[in-house]
Amino acid sequence: MRTLLAIGLACFLLSCAMGPNYSRPGFDIDDRFRMAEGRSDLPSLANLPWWDLLRDEQLQQLIRTALEDNWDLQRAVATIDEFRARALVARTDFLPQIATTMNAPALRHTGFLVPGFPNLFDYYFLGNVSWEMDLWGRIRRATEAARADLLSKEENRRAVTIQLVSTVAETYFNILQFDLQLDIAERTVRAWEESVRIAQARLRQGMTSKLDADQFEAERANAAARAAELQRQMVQAENQLSVLLGRKPFAVARGRSLDEQILVPDVPAGLPSELLQRRPDVLVAERQLAAATARIGAAKAARFPKVTLTGVAGMANPALQSIFASPGHFGVFGAALAGPVFNAQVLGFEQETVEAQSKEALAQYQQTVLTAFREVEDSLIAVRTARTQSASQQEQVTALQSALKLAELRYKGGLANYLDVLVARRDLFQAELSWTSTRRFHLASVIQLYRALGGGWSPDGQPAKDPSKDSDHGEAHAHSISSP
């Protein structure tokens, strides 16, 4: 038995796993992003902890609540536990399989059919041992696939976390935008009400026409309708944020107003190659490709004969109370060879299936990388143009405020008609609403860039580590995609 075990162990150690070993696909990467400003070798914005990027204390509290109570994130964490258990199940195939049985007689018969073995109708205690020698690497490749699946679910949890925190921030900024726009609309309604009152007084005095008064009343009604719309959008945004926090709809407390939010002065993107190491969706696609590659080897190995070491040992006695005291012990040890015969063609089709799945995973990985670069470039140009657009619109609002004051003074003094006031206030109203939208877009574009770069969100409130610099993670990944 010792000789057979030594031979089996030597064959196991010397055998090679079938199928291709995984290696990261090559990708043409430039030295810098197309829309990046400044030096590309500066630390990426993604290295900044989220609490340094988002300075609003109330928003920080909302993010922490979401990280604790969001149900989508909890589901992602539970999925990790599921695939961790699956990986452990796959590893147990390396170990001998042991089973025991205890039979009781259906009929009383005390003879032996074959010398050295008990009759099936006697009492007996039987132990079976079976150990598959992984000569072709089927078990090793299956274990690699299971571990790659586990790593993909861990990265998927990071992706869900990034999406969650960025969505919470963007929804919060939407609420602040609606707050500010609602304040502008209500202030404009009050201004139009004053204009309506003046126009009605001038109408009674015969100093203006009913057309003037009706025009002012129409603009007042338009501003009031817009205020009602903004009120609805604000409450719906609160309800959306409540669900993200894992709560029933409630009134969300505010911190800094939209125009008080602090923006980072610089947004360095870092090196493009960092995307392949940081973006969780890219890493998910890569882990899935590694798992699909490993399954090719497992499918190939399944087409070859399986060599299994087996053993049977037991005790038998017609009397149950004497079974452990009886000298009726028996045992046998040997090797079994099993290979596909009639199902060989089916196994060939299964190999073709996993090879096609590997090609699908490769295409998905390539597409995910391209999408990552596009999102970064889109966010970079959005941040740059939103900053310029917001400054220009602020200048426009200042100019229109001055124009409105002059128009009102001229109208009250009888030096201008109602049309000057109407146009000036209408233009100011639209300009103020547009500026708040651009201000919110500027904040959101910074968040989107942070997310596109694979920023450091994490459930424990710490920046996410670069997988290439995490030795434990890197070793586990290397082990999961190469032959043992």
Image (spheres, rainbow, N blue to C red):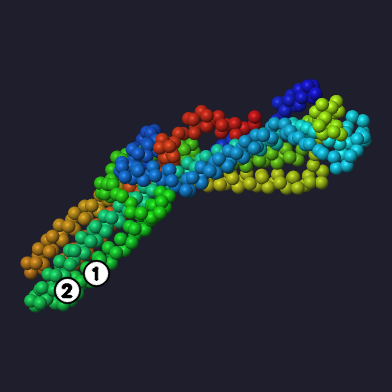
Q: Is residue 182 left or right of residue 310?
A: left
Residue furthest to the front: 321
The total of numbered circles placed on residues is 2
Specify which label sits upstream in the sequence, 2 or 1.
2
Instruction: Count residues near mark 2 (Cα–Cα under 10 Å), then give few for <14, some for 14-19, many for 20+.
Output: many
Between 240 and 448, which is closer to the camera in this rendering? Answer: 240
Q: Does the residue at mark 2 contact the one at mark 1 (Cβ under 8 Å)? A: no
Which three-letter amino acid code belongs to the residue tagged 2?
Ala
**Residue 353 seen from this side:** yes
Question: Residue 213 — which label?
Answer: 2
State the residue at coordinates (89%, 36%): 119
| Residue at mark 1 | 221
Which secondary structure lies at badge 1? helix
Which secondary structure lies at badge 2? helix
Q: Is residue 136 left or right of residue 37?
A: right
Query: Quarter of the image containing the N terminus?
Result: top right
Instruction: Count residues near mark 1 (Cα–Cα under 10 Å), then give few for <14, some for 14-19, many for 20+.
Output: some
State the residue at coordinates (72%, 28%): 12
Write down the quadrant of residue 113 in the picture: top right
Which three-letter amino acid code belongs to the residue tagged 1?
Ala
